[in-house]
Amino acid sequence: MPPDLYGELDAKFRFDFDPCPCPRPPDFDGLAVPWGRSSFVNPPFRRRDGFNGAGPGAFVRKAIAENQAGRGSVVVLPTRSYVNLLVEAGAELRSMGRVRWLEVDTKQPCTKARSITAFILRGKP
């Protein structure tokens, strides 16, 4: 992450822990230790790049667990540009869960479910 962008986040959130330091010390596992009061989390974006195969999902789950224990995190993840456009426009986000879409021709549920998010842009009265 560029230092100026990190500096903006750090000034606001005052980080005291990084479970994904780069470079990572040998045998350091940020998922196996308690996190700080305010953690900066820039996880490996692919499982194959993480310690013991841990990818972004593992760090998101850990951030949620740490949050439930009263600790905060700023998790930085890659997103598609159109997602950022919707967020910047003020869209509300709602998880729709894992959805099995229907095949176009057969109208039968697809074999694989996909995680779906609804982006809600409310019209102005």
Image (cartoon, grey):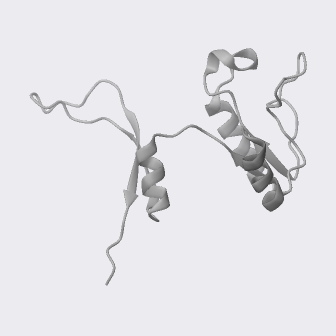
Q: Residue at x 81, y 47 (%)?
A: 39
- The quarter of the displayed image where residue 1 is located: top right
Q: Residue at x 44, y 63 (%)?
A: 89
Would residue 5 be found to the left or right of residue 123 on screen?
right
Q: Is residue 115 above or below residue 26?
A: below
> Where is residue 2 shown, x and y percent of the image?
73, 40
> Where is residue 11 shown, x and y percent of the image?
83, 59
Q: Residue at x 74, y 40 (%)?
A: 41
Would residue 20 be found to the left or right of residue 84 on screen?
right
Residue 96 appears in the picture as rendered: no
- The quarter of the displayed image where residue 33 is located: top right
> Where is residue 124 shown, x and y percent of the image?
33, 79
> Where is residue 16 shown, x and y percent of the image?
90, 48
Residue 83 appears in the picture as rendered: yes
Q: Is residue 113 above or below residue 125?
A: above
Q: Check the picture and name the quadrant holding the C terminus.
A: bottom left
Would residue 76 be found to the left or right of residue 31 on screen?
left
Farthest residue, direction bottom: 125
Would residue 10 be found to the left or right of residue 93 on screen?
right
